[in-house]
Image (spheres, rainbow, N blue to C red):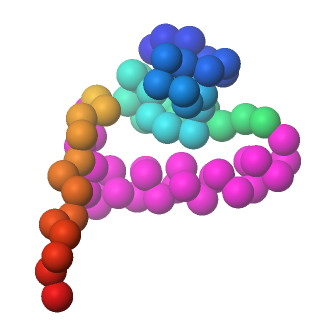
Amino acid sequence: MGRIWGIGPDGEMNNMWKRTAQEGLWFVGGSFTNCRIYSRYVALQIKAIEEGLLPKNGRKSVPSPSMGEG
């Protein structure tokens, strides 16, 4: 699963507010304000996985929407 908390080499928090290597295991933490704000984004990520918009396993890149349509 890797480290939890602290800053990773990508400049983001280690395994916080995003999926971990263990399927279905998510970590949230910090102040009440952080948890209240960022829990919405965790819920959206989980919903996207359940709806098939994000891959179930791994942190594979997601195709970005094409630009210039409309």
* Residue 39 shows in the view: yes
Q: What residue lies at 47% left-to-right and 25% top-to-bottom?
A: 10
Residue 53 magenta: yes
Q: What residue lies at 49% left-to-right and 11% top-to-bottom?
A: 2
Q: Is 47 positioned to the left or the right of 55 in the image? A: right
Residue 32 in the image: state x and y as whole percent.
84, 48
13 or 1, which lies in front? 13
Rendered image quadrant of residue 55: top left
Residue 58 in the image: state x and y as whole percent.
28, 29
Farthest top residue?
A: 2
25 or 13, which lies in front? 13
Q: What residue lies at 76% left-to-right and 47% top-to-bottom?
A: 34
Q: Is 55 positioned to the left or the right of 49 in the image? A: left
Farthest bottom residue?
A: 70
Rendered image quadrant of residue 52: bottom left
Tell me which secondary structure the magenta stretch mostly adopts: helix
Farthest right residue?
A: 32
Q: What residue lies at 17% left-to-right and 76% top-to-bottom?
A: 68
In the rendered image, the vertical position of residue 34 relative to residue 47, given as above or below: above
Specify start and end residues of the magenta stretch as a single range. 31-57
In the rendered image, the vertical position of residue 63 relative to residue 31, given as above or below: below
Q: Is 18 positioned to the left or the right of 61 in the image? A: right
* Residue 52 shows in the view: no
Residue 3 magenta: no
In the rendered image, the vertical position of residue 21 relative to residue 68, given as above or below: above
Q: In the rendered view of the protein, which quadrant contains the C terminus?
A: bottom left
Q: In the rendered view of the protein, which quadrant contains the N terminus?
A: top left
